Image (tube, rainbow, N blue to C red):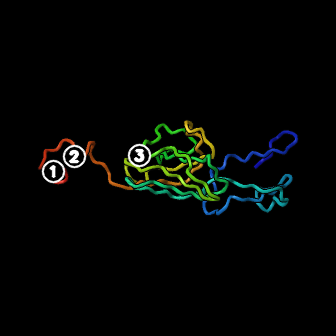
Amino acid sequence: LAVNDASPYDTYTMGTPDGVPEGKEYGHYLICWAHSPSSNAASAYTVPAGKLTIVGPEKQSLHCILSTPCVITLQGIGLADTNQVIIIPRDSMCGVSPDDVPTFVGMSNPRLVDSTIGTEEVFHFGTPGSAPLEPGENYRACWAHDPDPSNQADYRVFVGLFTLSGAQVFSDPPCAGFTPGSDPYCF
């Protein structure tokens, strides 16, 4: 970090955190300061200057199954009843407006948290009846503290990859264009 180059030299630019780091149970940090440190080594910063808490969910892999209720529980710090999660294509990035937010039959996307108790929040997405990008680990989940639901760029925090398991659809409508009695899988 570096101090802004303007008097009174008390503002530091840290960037935007993307959630609680993996493997870190809580997002609590000690801030230390140094006057003109000779290096960026942590040992050069010897003056405790304060504490920093990064709020948000811990990173984790998420999983739901087609035709069963999709309930996602997140653990984290400073969770609130304004939190939301959005499911986007795996090759999209959180915090960037994707061109195509998947529409799942029977599932809300994005989804406002249903309940928050302490360090846990629960999202009831609904019962997915479709996997627009096919079943599998084809999605990612992104979190936001208090987003504008119409602005996907507000969902900056990558929670984890989202897997939707279930049968793959091979034709639409199922068994379209078959002759009855000629296909053992379509009746």
Q: Amino acid at mark 2?
A: Cys
Q: Position of residue 9 (x, y in %)?
A: 85, 43
* Three-letter amino acid code at the position of disc 3: Gly
Quarter location, residue 57: bottom right
**Would residue 21 be visible to someone looking at this image?**
no
Residue at image mark 3: 106
Tell me the mark number nearer the camera, choosing from 1 and 3. 3
163 over 13 or under it: above or below? below
Circle 1 Cα neighbour tier, 10 Å, few/some/many (<14 / 14–19 / ≥20)? few
Please report the residue visible at 60 percent of the width from the left and 54 percent of the height from the top.
116
Residue 48 or 83: which is nearer the viewer?
A: 83
Closer mark to the observer between disc 2 and disc 3: 3
- Mark 3 nearby-residue class (10 Å; few <14, some 14–19, many ≥20): some
In screen coordinates, is 175 left or right of 52?
Answer: left
The reply to whether dot 1 and dot 2 touch (C-beta < 8 Å) is yes
The dot on residue 183 is 1
Secondary structure beneath label 3 = loop
Measure how far apart labels 1 and 2 are at the Cα level. Answer: 9 Å
In this rendering, is residue 96 above or below 141?
above
Q: Which secondary structure, mark 1?
A: loop
The residue carrying mark 2 is 175
